[in-house]
Amino acid sequence: MEHENQKLVRSTQLLRSFWSVQKNIVRFVQKIAVENGLSVPQYTILMTLTLHKEMKLTQKKVGEQTFLPKSTLSHAVDGLAQEGFLNRQQVEGNRREMELKITDKGKAFLKRMHLQDGGIHQLFQSAMEQLTDKQYEELLESHLLLSAYLESQVTDQGGKMN
């Protein structure tokens, strides 16, 4: 019984730790997005396109990656396209599907945001300076292991768990 309680305490501490980090990341993302005239969904879309630049991403796939509702996604994509930050192109052979690609203007805009004083990347660089190289490597390795395990538990695209 004591062993089970200890496991529960440890898992709760870990969840609280991740929740706290996520909450603070969301705060800084909201701040940096607003300061640069973007909504959080727009920033999220630009980051998703940048992180998956080796893949062709359709609007549907971006929605699956970001968990944004279709209407929010569509509205955010429209705004980014109007600003010239991304291009939409119909997928060959599928009139209903649009491929999204970040433009050079979008890449430059995102780079300026990331280099901006007080931005999320500046904040994380400062946070990393608090860690030794070994601590950083161990933290990153732990996150990758946890992430891989959690992803392995997802059985379908609907997000249902085993």
Image (tube, rainbow, N blue to C red):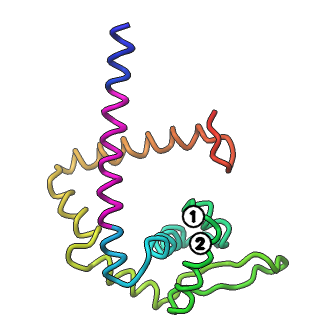
Where residue 155 sits in the image (x, y, percent)?
Answer: 67, 40
Quadrant that contains the C terminus: top right
Task: Check disc 1: other Cα within 10 Å, few if <14, some if 14-19, many if 20+.
Answer: some
Magenta stretch secondary structure, dominant:
helix
Residue lying at 30% horizontally and 45% vertically, measured from the top left: 139
Q: Secondary structure at mark 2?
A: helix
Residue lying at 82% horizontally and 76% vertically, measured from the top left: 94
The furthest residue to the right: 93
Which residue carries the number 1 mark? 68
Residue nearest the viewer, comparing 153 with 39: 39
Residue type at mark 1: give it.
Leu
Residue lying at 16% horizontally and 49% vertically, measured from the top left: 132
Query: Whole-Å distance between the Cαs marked 1 and 2?
Result: 6 Å
Contact, mark 1 vs mark 2 (Cβ under 8 Å): yes
Residue lying at 25% horizontally and 62% vertically, measured from the top left: 124
Residue type at mark 2: give it.
Leu
Q: Secondary structure at mark 1?
A: loop
Residue 24, image quadrant: bottom left
**Where 63 sits versus 17, above or below?**
below
Residue 11, image quadrant: top left
Residues in magenta, as a range: 10-28
Task: Check disc 2: other Cα within 10 Å, few if <14, some if 14-19, many if 20+.
Answer: many
The furthest residue to the top: 1
Residue 101's label in the rendered image is none
Which residue carries the number 2 mark? 73
- Relative to 97, 127 lies left or right: left
Quadrant that contains the N terminus: top left
**Where 153 sits versus 85, above or below?**
above
